[in-house]
Image (spheres, rainbow, N blue to C red):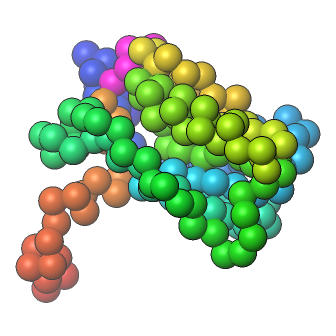
Amino acid sequence: MLTDDGKHLYVSWDEYHLLIERLALKVHHSGWEFDQILCLARGGMRPGDVLSRVFDKPLAIMSTSSYRAEAGTIQGRLDMAKYITMPKGELAGRVLLVDDLSDSGVTLKAVVQRLRSMPSIAELRSAVLWVKGLSTYTPDYFVEMLPTSPWIHQPFEEYDGLRPEGLARKLSV
């Protein structure tokens, strides 16, 4: 649900899962065949997991981080993991890069540049749920374009400030 001022988008679990399913269909309807999925942790893990299951393709994970200050609302320096985690072999062939959103575009653009420099990758395409209007990178596949670039409140963010003690209180109700 987008607020009247266009500055905040609140997403429920049901809406979130529907967006992932719509993304899977967009990729499928494109007709592009890929060999592996690489998701960016943490935001791309849930979409990457679902797409890995739907397409029955191996899932690799790369950790990136740029949001740290102010409870993860202010973008800082981009950190990219040196290694990619995967069950076997190397990242190769046709790879679908998955994240939750293209916010500023900085992270996706940097990861795409790094991956395109890997000779083992024959073709790379990217997929996200949302693209913000201020993004400098537009993925190959996306579900929603958000021209006002609202802050997206994703359903799993309730866990960002929840610690074991709070969880114990919540579950004892």
Query: Is 68 placed left or right of 64 in the picture?
Result: left
- Main SS, magenta region, reads loop
Across the whole image, how many numbered discs are drawn on residues?
Answer: 0
Q: Residue at x 90, y 39 (%)?
A: 31
The x and y percentages for residue 138 are 59, 22
Q: Which is nearer the eye, 153 or 59?
A: 59
**Residue 141 seen:** yes
Q: Is residue 168 above or below residue 38?
A: below
Q: Residue at x 19, y 81 (%)?
A: 171
The x and y percentages for residue 37 are 69, 55
Q: Is residue 12 above or below residue 124?
A: below
The x and y percentages for residue 106 are 44, 28
Query: Is 129 placed left or right of 28 in the picture?
Result: left
The x and y percentages for residue 23 are 67, 42
Q: Residue at x 57, y 60 (%)?
A: 84
Residue bounds of the magenta highlight: 146-150
Tell whether position 15 is magenta. no
**Residue 14 seen:** no
Q: Which is nearer the eye, 66 or 5?
A: 66
The N terminus: image quadrant: top left
Q: Is residue 72 above or below residue 30?
A: below
The C terminus: image quadrant: bottom left
Query: Is 94 placed left or right of 43 in the picture?
Result: right
Q: Residue at x 25, y 16 (%)?
A: 5
Query: Is 54 placed left or right of 14 in the picture?
Result: right
